[in-house]
Amino acid sequence: MRSSLLVEMSMILSASVIRVRDGLPLSASTDYEQGTGVQECRKYFKMLSRKLAQLPDRCTLKTGRYNINFISSMGVSYMMLCTENYPNVLAFSFLDELQKEFITTYNMMKTNTAVRPYCFIEFDNFIQRTKQRYNNPRSLSTKINLSDMQMEIKLRPPYQISMGELGSANGVTSAFSVDYKGAGKISSAHQRLEPATLSGIVAFILSLLCAALNLIRGFHAIESLLQSDGEDFNYIVAFFLGTAACLYQCYLLVYYTSWRNVKSFLTFGLICLCNMYLYELRNLWQLFFHVTVGAFVTLQIWLRQAQGKAPDYDV
């Protein structure tokens, strides 16, 4: 009886904040309804949390009498459960408010380093207040402007997840790719990498610096060759190969590709060979700097792996 009444009322029932890379629940509503249909949807929450890294940033799953909507941004997903007749524009406006408040309240470093489930459970206070507002349409009429959200949903509607894509409730799912307007095809060849660390950012900057130094020396070598100063043409090739290798390391640090680790080691080998050939033009400290930076970037590429399968958290 209570479950039927919920469906007729058109309302938001619950919401959760989940880390994308591993499905760790960061915060959630503490007043879940106990109806059979709502409890079944909690299983879908858990299944979706395992696949967030593979899904577009705005999705809807229709489970019959209830809808699950979520948006993802900056490594965090905001998920909500509502009745099937709850307006789409209100649902995604609600999620947008959660996202803005969460980003304002917690910095990315905290969310990336969190290890305990529900470590931001105090955010539930904001979820409850916002949910009450959105479940009372009269309180919204003068407080929010839905025209922007209506236009955004019209131009880029949420991806509709099918039960076939979601997989079975026991967690045994098959790999799939999603063809989504605005998101492209998401497959194993375009996986998301784990969030960048401070050491990774430093490695990226140092690699760019080495590329710039090689490029400048390469142009100087060209000038010397044109002035007939006896500059070896092979030095020019070595400088520009070093530049390309450093830039490719930056690419591997940012993007996922197949055989990524192997490519990083081969690129590092090329950097070492170029510096060996340039031994006569560089002092030991310069050689040490370029090789050390190359090794450091290679290590960071190896450490920053693709987001793997999420642990089985009780979302």
Image (cartoon, rainbow, N blue to C red):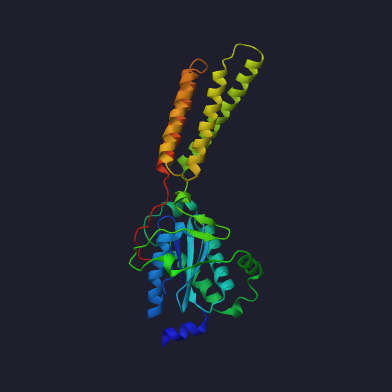
* Residue 184 to residue 216: above or below: below
Q: Residue at x 52, y 60 (%)?
A: 179
Residue at 52 percent of width and 76 percent of height: 132
Residue 295 or residue 198, whichever sits in front: 295
Relative to 85, does residue 197 appear above or below in the rendering? above
Question: How far from the left and from the top, in percent, is residue 23?
Answer: 40, 59
The foreground one among 102 and 309 is 309
The number of numbered discs placed on residues in the rendered structure image is 0
Residue 285 screen position, x and y as percent: 47, 21
Q: Residue at x 33, y 67 (%)?
A: 170
- Residue 314 appears anywhere in the view: yes
Relative height, residue 216 to residue 10 (above, below): above
Q: Residue at x 53, y 71 (%)?
A: 130
Question: Which quadrant of the figure contains the C terminus?
Answer: bottom left
Residue 299 picture location, percent across and down: 41, 37
* x and y, in percent, of residue 234 in the image: 54, 19
- Give the residue at the far bottom of this rendering: 1
Q: Which picture quadrant has residue 35?
A: bottom left
In the rendered image, the quadrant that contains the N terminus is: bottom left
Residue 265's place in the image compared with 22, above or below, is above
Q: Report whether residue 34 is seen.
A: no
